[in-house]
Image: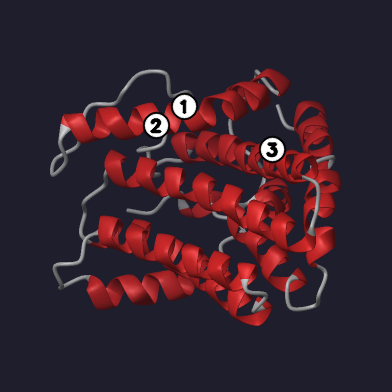
Amino acid sequence: MSKLNTSDKFLDLSDYGRSFGRFFALQLKETRFTPIHVTLLFGISGLLAIYCILNQHYLAAAFFIILKSGIDAADGELARLKKTPSYVGRYLDSVFDIILNFLFLMSICYVSKTSIWVALLAFIGIQLQGTLYNYYYVILRNKSVGGDATSKIFEYKTPKALPGETQQAVNILFGIYTLVYSIFDKIIHFLDTDAYKVKTFPNWFMTSLSLYGLGFQLLIIAFMLPLGWIEFIAPFFIIYSLLIFVLIGIRKTWIR
């Protein structure tokens, strides 16, 4: 099962880890490894990156950040190969992402002696950027014929557990997911309430939007760390957030 119909596929600049993720998933297809196990692996890779940042091993940190992106692509690929879509896996993946994003920025700001308020603003910026990308992308996936519909445009109700997972696990993870993401979802929805009405998004727009995908955000961090630009990472993401208004303006003006 593909996330998008062929006609809706676009060059996703944040999805550079897909080839590795697909290769890794193929190696695990006939094993007892589950997509949840792969999600745990990318969490470990993220924690190793944080350890390296705190110890100022920036090249190693960059490696583990990029590896995290590759492994992050593998859990969904494995779920599709084994035909085991999962709400537990989707919410766990998202919860791990936001926790790691927060810890990445806190560790970067601790080492660079950046103000905690700058770090928090950068974190909010990164989350709003990613939320805009996910908002438009999920709309596209839900409108794409044959696309993956485990993600919903608006997630207000706990979904019914899919085969192979318990309703209790879905309830717990959905509750955590809603707690940590709902404020960002509401802000982006407020900024572009009518986005769900569009028939589709042109490929050029989605490629531009993918600059806000988590993979590309992490690539920027992985690029800046070995260059010794650690003190500029948080300010960069604050300024980078201004592109949110540009992209929403383009959507409202030309994509209806």
Q: Which mark is residue 124?
A: 3
Q: Which mark is residue 146?
A: none
Q: Find disc 2 in the rendering and name its residue.
A: 176
* Of the image marks 3 and 1, the number of the one nearer the N terminus: 3
Disc 3 residue type?
A: Ile
Q: Is residue 214 above or below residue 16?
A: above
State the image coordinates of residue 244 (x, y, percent, origin top left): 78, 38
Residue 121 appears in the picture as rendered? yes
Residue 56 sits in which quadrant? bottom right
Residue 146 appears in the picture as rendered? no
Q: Find disc 1 in the rendering and name its residue.
A: 179
Disc 1 residue type?
A: Leu
* Of the image marks 2 and 3, the number of the one nearer the N terminus: 3
SS state under label 3: helix
SS state under label 1: helix
Residue 40 sits in which quadrant? bottom left
State the image coordinates of residue 76 (x, y, percent, origin top left): 36, 56
Q: Quadrant of the C terminus?
A: top right
Q: Are marks 1 and 2 in contact (CB under 8 Å)?
A: yes
